[in-house]
Image (tube, coloured by chain):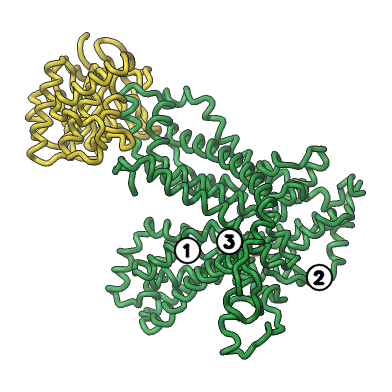
Chain colours: A yellow, B green
Amino acid sequence: MSEGLTLENVRIARGAAELIAVERHVPPGEVLAVMGPSGVGKSTLLAFVTGTLAPGFTATGRVLLDGADLTGTPPEGRRLGILFQNDLLFPHLSVGGNLAFGLAPGGSRAARRARIDAALAEIGLEGFADRDPATLSGGQKARVALMRMLLSDPRALLLDEAFSGLDAARRGQVRALVFDIARDRGLPVLMVTHDEEDARAAGGPVIRLGEDQPPG
Amino acid sequence: MTATSRAGRLRALPALTVLAMLGPVAAGLAGTLLPAAGLHPAAGGTGLSLGPLRSLLDWPGLAAAARLSVVTGLVATALALGGVALLLAGWAGTRAFRALERLLSPLLSVPHAAMAFGLAFLVAPSGWVSRLVSPWLTGWERPPDILIVQDPWGLALIAGLVAKEMPFLLLMSLAALGQADARRRMQVATALGHGRVAGWIKAVFPAVYAQIRLPVYVVLAYSMSVVDAAMILGPTTPPTLSVQIVRWMGDPDLAMRLTAAAGALLQLGLVIAALGLWRAGEAVVAALGTRWIARGGRGRAADPALRAIGLGAGIFSAAAVLGGLACLGVWSVAGFWGFPDALPDQLDTGSWSRHLPGIADAAGTTALIAAAATAAALVLVVGCLETEHRRGVALSRRGLWLIYLPLLVPQTAFLPGVQTLLLWAGLDSGIGPVTLAHLVFVLPYVFLSLGDPWRAWDPRHAVVAAALGTSPVGVLWRVRLPMLLRPILTAAAVAIAVSVGQYLPTLLVGGGRVATLTTEAVALASGGDRRAIGVWGVAQTAAVMLPFAAALAVPALVWRNRRGLHV
């Protein structure tokens, strides 16, 4: 068990009721889709992986990244990129400020600025650094949120209904962009979704929750 | 969760907050109880005795003072609540309501003393109302010789309290309306043929009242024991019980402190009894209301009259407070102003230049105390809310009672005790203790003001920031606080307004030697110099209004290019 994201005998319960039981390994570049109706606890699994599980839930099992145990690591030390349904760009920062928030510390001011400008060019938003994120279109915001996450140099991607907020045309585009980047960079992806189309496009294994099926 | 283990310093803040809010209340009650039982060495009380109680009972004005306290409290609270209910029932959602709401919201912060002076200037025999209708309507060439302000029944005091507390209850009700699903309840009620007002009272009011019950109790406790407004508008012989307690506390004969302590205990008992009575009244009203609903009447015929009363109540509140403030403003720049002229003959800035040095001094002290209390309250409340967020626990019902507790215990019941304790401990009364006393009253309002926006913040922002490598402290400073700049500044403005308006804590805990805009203004009450009162009243009001203006202007300026943070 080495490269990739491993969910080792993960069991999450609320009170006495077990919500999730997962045992899976996601190799680099592969997308594991977790599907199921809303309220079944899909996002709870992501909260466990990021280390932000709300009190009231109890979890056992381990999360391993490239063989190293993450379970005791604080959320900010895990280097897991997460995208939600909403872009969640920080409204008080400019587009460039949001990217700088993600960009790992270090480097001169000019060098950081150059990284951000280059990153914006990469997602087709050249010269957008000083813009107010609230003035961007939905697709543009999604791309900025994606790039903000990538600049933090994550070692795995977590997608929480990440494409549900986009209209049909943008959806396919942004989805393809995310999956391409994950493949190029060799990042394991854990995707939570209720949309079959997302799972098909990912082309990887699928776990279905809430449909009496033995875990693993 | 790991974030919790690294929040060591934060964890102390909730306990510290409870201590800052309830410590002085508990200590003050103890400091009241002991002298009331005869223990007060400095004043010659060396052993348990019934002396203080006896001297209280010997005071001939006791029955009248106690009755005044109870009646003004109950009547003012019932009228303010009824006015707000009828205003909401008859007008919520209309354009007239929105206009009134915009007028009433800023009035919340007007200090009670300024309101009381303004109302006195309006309704006095030589006041603005009388001038406006004289002599063409009344035939008065000279002010009529009738007692309106400081009337023996406390009617002027009740009117002032109703005008001042209506905006508070209205704001609390508006916050409750959202959770009560008022719009759909009304749709159902009107579809079933109920009149507008009757339908609202039957279908919406119970849900709203459940939410505003504690604020209503605060209004009741406050109205029964208010001192500054009662000194200005209330009767004098005898005054309300609370005013008499303060008079005893200020008596050069230290033995009177024991009587004051006994009176303070009585005041506490009266407030507890009145709260119990109100609670019982709730049950009676609920039972009657259930029967009314069961009878099935639709109450449509009563709509016009009840809506008129509701609107009238709202207009009364706005007119009394705003008209009063305008009257203060005019008096502050009035030259000769003979009766029955509606306006002064000439304008004269002499009053301002005469009082400006004194105002500058008092404003400096006021600002120092307000700034310190506000800063402390913000740190404590943000610390509590952040701890709540990181532990994932919500404020319990009991927690909410704790927040309201300092506002439910009458000020006159525990502040004399605080003064006594300071005296015993040989501690210098001064700006420090006064600031701590202000903090007791500032903290609850900062909690109530900041709590909802703080909890409404999308916690996924914290998850995203943490995933980007930001520590919990970094999330707080770099994401949450900047995003919540507007509600934080609003809470700060509320805090400053509460601090600026405090009369009794400043007077008693400051030992009469800490002069703020409010204590100086109230001290003018007995002198009757209307120009001086006008100047100080305007200064006092400006001291609460300017922070609110800043709380609106600063975020608009700082976030002018951030549309996502506009309201």
Amino acid identity at mark 1:
Leu
Q: Chain of mark 1?
A: B
Q: Decide: is B483 above or below B523.
A: above
Q: Are marks 3 and 1 on the same chain?
A: yes
Q: CA distance from mark 3 to mark 1?
A: 17 Å
Q: Decide: is B275 above or below A31.
A: below
Marks 3 and 2 in Cβ contact (< 8 Å): no
Q: Is residue A193 left or right of residue B265?
A: left
Q: Residues within 10 Å of mark 1 (few under 14, many from 20)?
A: many
Residue sitting nearer the eye, B474 or B199: B474
Q: Earlier in the sequence, mark 2 or mark 1?
A: 2
Marks 3 and 1 in Cβ contact (< 8 Å): no
| Res B353 quadrant in image | bottom right
* Mark 3 lies on residue: B219
Q: Chain of mark 2?
A: B
| Res B392 quadrant in image | top left
Residue sitting nearer the eye, B478 or B28: B478
| Res B324 quadrant in image | bottom right
Q: Which mark is residue B459?
A: none
Q: Are marks 2 and 1 on the same chain?
A: yes
Q: Which residue appears at 76% of the width and 70% of the height?
A: B236
Q: Which mark is residue B104?
A: 1
Foreground disc of the pair 3, 1:
1
Amino acid identity at mark 2:
Gly
* Mark 2 lies on residue: B61
